[in-house]
């Protein structure tokens, strides 16, 4: 409950005229918010939102697809399943700061003879067209920034899906087999529909994680324009003691998260009511 | 239903298709394993780079020779990294262990109440708690600092412990609530009732002993999340009294960073959480099945 | 509610138990002896300078113990983040490094540093520092910091072998001449002759170009609001800056200044604009083959910045801090520090004997040259001002949109320039 009190505090702060370390100059209502959208230099805030959008999209799709593929591969039992599962899951245990260290190196933008990291592999295999500037690309840099995040969380999504698959009663499969369904049909008609709640959970979890993404970006590129997302922007404004602006961005983030999450929660609650 | 949650320990796949024993060498199977191994290689690639680089010495480290094995294996970078990270490494244990224990315990108590006791407004409380899981840190960061000062918590580990416990309660509550709702038979509670035990006693003597799987999940979760946190850490502590992520970032973010030492540092930073995962990962997935997914 | 209350009590009890154990584990060090000095001088020439100062501190303040609180990272970006957090959580170091000038005003406005005007008189600093500098660090008649050094920001460093190979015999003294030289280098096979790093290093380059095009007075006016950022002369400067970017390495946004310096040392690039800490750094790394000149077109303008130390509010060991500040301001301290750091003493009464060649030249210039402040290093603009400029430069680095950069700079200046 304390947390909710703090949120109230932040909302209040976001409506104050407090742009330096001195006390507030009074209440300004929603000005700080409108300024973010209309009067931010270079549309910095909108730019950070755009970055976040690209990042979130790539990150969510990437983790879902990879997690799904891995879960499908493992779902019917494979040799040494435990080992595979552990390998796929282990990146999740690594902190973003630590993985940022290595990914900063792997995603070195140098090309051809100056190349390093992944570009060097492409170069070595003669796949020069695959070399790219990674996160320094002005348009798609954020997609590259999502690569380490996908690496870290695809395993988690896989675990969710595996749990989902295993939660499906065997009778369903057997019934389908009786009806002479092909494997494809089995998955398409019987299993996937059962997984909808799992997909939803996975989307919610990855989605809200990407809203908070801060440490990874800080440790790969540092705080710079090209990879700025709202979370980093908050940090930057705080450093310059622009409290009100920082609070406004934070509240905005909160609202976005709420818009995504609340329907899901309501849904969960309804489901609970039905089942009890 | 036994009192041992079968879901939790079950990790081997149910052997389907027992009747149609397919040859393990069918084309589909081979393709699957090839794919699996390919992905393993991809996933392990960064780890490989981390490990080989951390054993290299100054001259061999360069962007161009990232993929080669060290010519001379040396521990120098590891020593350097340990010197930089050692103190904060121990400090982070002081942070992560209490956080894991306290928030798990509180989560268990809350979860139990929410799963068993239908007080008016329970749904609302539950929803609020659930939403608490998703609140971005940024939304509370600024006032949090003032609150912490107001309470007079010293900067660094105590503050961070406090913050992570508060932030961890929602997810722990959720995991336990689902766990109790799905695995603790009502009869057990009833039996307690008959013996005239109140809620508290029921909880203590009957429920806690069978909550181990839930505890494993929440402890792993909280341990890793507080161990790996950077945002609160950078906000509420510093290199002198902060956790290891801060120290690592200082090491790796320095001018002309020593890549080998940074990589060794990254490995040191990740070691405890990796161990936790590799040793308890099976339980973790099992626990996920028992808890978080059953929504 | 009986149940939840008891849970709360239990949780509190656990928390209390824990915090009790935490307190006992807390290091209550001999605070009265320790002087924790917070800087961003963690390696290379900067660390060498700090070590020199520490040695001096050891002799003149034998009662106290120096504790190094350095946080690494270019131009103090990381350090300032850590420092901000420490100041706001009431855990200030005994003293910290800040750039003299506008950047210091952030701390003064926040009430985070103490007035030390009284000590200035006692230590005889009022007459030792040049009047211009004293004026710059005086806010509302009070002085809050002791400058340790003066750095020059607008210096062009070069790899002599690379430039000689391209047939460049003398340093260019106009921007156009410089661009002609860069073309020569490019034709000779040096793909990116001008080495550049990320955000703030790009701002430094932009500032140097502005000095060349606008001249010292108009340049200074950009920061105090008397020069219009929207002018055609600024447009021309940004165009030239854009032209210069075409000679730089593509991975500039991933490099700190030391990485860019490395390509000079390796001969991959010929030139780099950087402050004169580069001299100390090159010396410390044993690279001898470097040349230096004022940035082409800057004439005799000396773009300065100064590192200063302060007495934070709530510092735990005030006497120790004062002893440190006194050492920093003393002639011996300034000499020990600056001869290693590549900077020059802020005091005018330190003899240049025994200083490396580059600094002797800089000391002579400091006395005669026209002085302009640096924004990238906080002498000309506050942290908010600087942050917004760096962000705009970062955007320009990725899109090269001249009109957008100029509009952004003008908007930033409208928000910050000339405002205390």
Image (cartoon, rainbow, N blue to C red):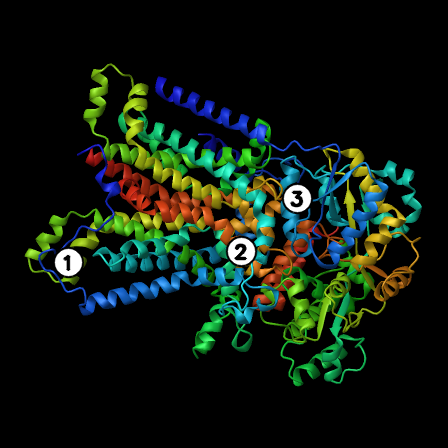
The chain to which mark 2 is attached is B
Reading the image, the residue beneath label 3 is C83
Residue at which label 2 appears: B264
Q: Report the side of B120 relative to B97 (left or right).
A: left
Q: What residue is at 66 percent from the left and 68 percent from the top?
A: C262
Residue C289 picture location, percent across and down: 76, 74
Can residue B191 be seen in the rendering of this structure?
yes
Q: Relative to the observer, which residue lies in front, A23 or C31? A: C31
Residue A135 showing in the rendered view: no
Q: Assess whether mark 3 and mark 1 are in contact (beta carbons under 8 angstroms).
A: no
* Chain letter of the residue carrying label 3: C
Secondary element at image label 3: helix
Residue under label 1: A186
Whether residue B98 is situated above or below residue A242 in the rendered picture: above
Q: Chain of mark 1?
A: A
Closer to the camera: disc 1 or disc 2?
A: 2
Q: Secondary structure at mark 1?
A: helix
């Amino acid at each position: 409950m304390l947390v909710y009190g703090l949120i109230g505090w932040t909302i209040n702060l976001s409506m104050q005229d407090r742009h330096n370390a001195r006390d507030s100059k009074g209440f300004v209502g929603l000005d700080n918010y409108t300024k973010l959208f209309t009067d931010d230099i270079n549309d910095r805030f909108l730019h950070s939102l755009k970055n976040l959008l690209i990042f979130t999209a790539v990150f969510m799709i990437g983790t879902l697809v990879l997690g799904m593929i891995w879960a499908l591969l493992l779902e019917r039992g494979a040799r040494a399943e435990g080992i595979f599962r552990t390998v796929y899951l282990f990146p999740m245990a690594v902190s973003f700061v630590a993985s940022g260290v290595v990914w900063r190196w792997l995603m070195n933008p140098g090309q051809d003879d100056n190349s390093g990291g992944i570009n060097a592999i492409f170069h070595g295999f003669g796949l020069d067209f695959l070399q790219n500037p990674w996160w320094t690309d002005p348009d798609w840099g954020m997609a590259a920034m999502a690569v380490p995040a996908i690496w870290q969380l695809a395993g988690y999504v896989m675990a969710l899906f595996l749990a989902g698959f295993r939660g499906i009663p065997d009778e369903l499969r057997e019934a389908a087999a009786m009806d002479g369904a092909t494997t494809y049909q089995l998955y398409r008609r019987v299993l996937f529909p059962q997984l909808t709640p799992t997909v939803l959970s996975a989307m919610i979890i990855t989605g809200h994680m990407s809203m908070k993404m801060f440490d990874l970006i800080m440790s790969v590129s540092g705080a710079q324009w090209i990879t700025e997302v709202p979370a980093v922007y908050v940090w930057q404004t705080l450093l310059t003691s622009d409290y009100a602006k920082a609070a406004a961005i934070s509240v905005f983030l909160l609202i976005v998260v709420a818009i995504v999450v609340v329907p899901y929660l309501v849904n969960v609650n309804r489901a609970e009511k039905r089942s009890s | 239903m036994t009192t041992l949650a079968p879901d939790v320990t079950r990790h081997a796949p149910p052997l389907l298709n027992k009747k149609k024993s397919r040859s393990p060498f069918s084309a589909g199977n081979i393709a699957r394993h090839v794919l699996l191994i390919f992905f393993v290689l991809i996933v392990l690639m960064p780890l490989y780079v981390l490990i080989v680089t951390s054993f290299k010495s100054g001259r061999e480290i360069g962007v161009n020779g990232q993929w080669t094995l060290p010519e001379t294996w040396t521990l120098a970078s590891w020593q350097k990294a340990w010197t930089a990270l050692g103190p904060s490494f121990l400090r982070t244990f002081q942070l992560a262990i209490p956080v894991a224990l306290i928030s798990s315990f509180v989560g268990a108590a809350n979860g139990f109440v929410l799963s068993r006791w239908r007080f008016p407004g329970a749904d609302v409380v539950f929803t609020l708690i659930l939403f608490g899981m998703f609140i971005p840190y940024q939304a509370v960061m600024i006032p949090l600092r003032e609150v912490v000062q107001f309470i007079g918590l010293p900067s660094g580990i105590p503050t961070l412990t406090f913050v992570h416990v508060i932030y961890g309660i929602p997810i722990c509550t959720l995991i336990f609530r689902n766990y109790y709702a799905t695995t603790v038979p009502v009869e057990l509670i009833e039996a307690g009732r008959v013996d005239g035990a109140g809620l508290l006693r029921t909880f203590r003597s009957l429920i806690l002993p069978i909550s181990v799987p839930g505890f494993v999940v929440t402890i792993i979760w909280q341990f890793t999340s507080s161990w790996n946190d950077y945002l609160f850490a950078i906000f509420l502590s510093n290199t002198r009294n902060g956790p290891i992520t801060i120290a690592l970032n200082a090491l790796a973010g320095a001018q002309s960073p020593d890549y080998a030492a940074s990589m060794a540092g990254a490995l040191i930073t990740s070691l405890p959480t990796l161990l936790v995962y590799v040793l308890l990962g099976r339980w973790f997935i099992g626990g996920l099945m028992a808890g978080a997914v059953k929504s | 509610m009986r149940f939840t209350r008891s849970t709360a009590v239990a949780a509190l009890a656990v928390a209390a138990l824990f915090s009790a154990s935490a307190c006992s584990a807390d290091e209550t060090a001999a605070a009265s002896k320790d002087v924790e000095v917070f800087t961003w001088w963690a390696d290379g020439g900067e660390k060498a300078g700090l070590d020199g100062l520490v040695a001096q501190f050891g002799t003149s303040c034998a009662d106290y113990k120096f504790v190094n609180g350095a946080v690494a990272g270019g131009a103090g970006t990381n350090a300032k983040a850590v420092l901000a957090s420490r100041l706001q959580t009431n855990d200030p170091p005994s003293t910290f490094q800040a750039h003299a000038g506008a950047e210091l005003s952030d701390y003064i406005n926040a009430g985070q540093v103490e007035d030390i005007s009284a000590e200035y008189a006692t230590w005889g600093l009022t007459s030792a520092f040049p009047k211009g500098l004293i004026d710059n660090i005086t806010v509302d008649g009070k002085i809050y910091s002791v400058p340790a050094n003066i750095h020059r920001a607008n210096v062009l460093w070069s790899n002599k072998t690379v430039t000689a190979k391209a047939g460049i015999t003398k340093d260019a003294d106009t921007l156009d001449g410089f661009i002609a030289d860069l073309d020569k280098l490019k034709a000779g096979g040096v793909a990116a002759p001008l080495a550049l790093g990320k955000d703030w290093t790009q701002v430094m380059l932009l500032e140097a170009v502005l000095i060349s095009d606008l001249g010292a007075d108009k340049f200074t006016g950009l920061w105090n609001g008397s020069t219009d950022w929207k002018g055609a002369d600024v447009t021309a400067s940004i165009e030239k800056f854009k032209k210069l970017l075409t000679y730089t390495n593509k991975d500039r946004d991933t490099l700190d200044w030391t990485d860019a310096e490395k390509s000079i040392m390796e001969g991959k690039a010929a030139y780099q604009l950087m402050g004169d800490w580069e001299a100390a750094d090159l010396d410390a790394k044993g690279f001898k083959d470097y040349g230096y000149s004022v940035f082409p077109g800057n004439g005799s303008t000396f773009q300065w910045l100064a590192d200063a130390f302060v007495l934070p509010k709530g510092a735990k060991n005030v006497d120790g801090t004062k002893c440190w500040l006194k050492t920093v301001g003393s002639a011996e301290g300034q000499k020990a520090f600056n001869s290693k750091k590549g900077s020059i003493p802020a005091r005018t009464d330190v003899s240049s004997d025994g200083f490396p060649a580059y600094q002797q030249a800089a000391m002579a210039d400091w006395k005669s040259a026209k002085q302009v402040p640096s924004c990238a290093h906080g002498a000309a603009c506050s942290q908010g001002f600087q942050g917004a400029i760096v962000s705009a430069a970062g955007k320009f680095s990725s899109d090269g949109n001249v009109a957008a950069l100029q509009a952004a700079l003008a908007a930033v200046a409208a928000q910050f320039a000339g405002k205390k």
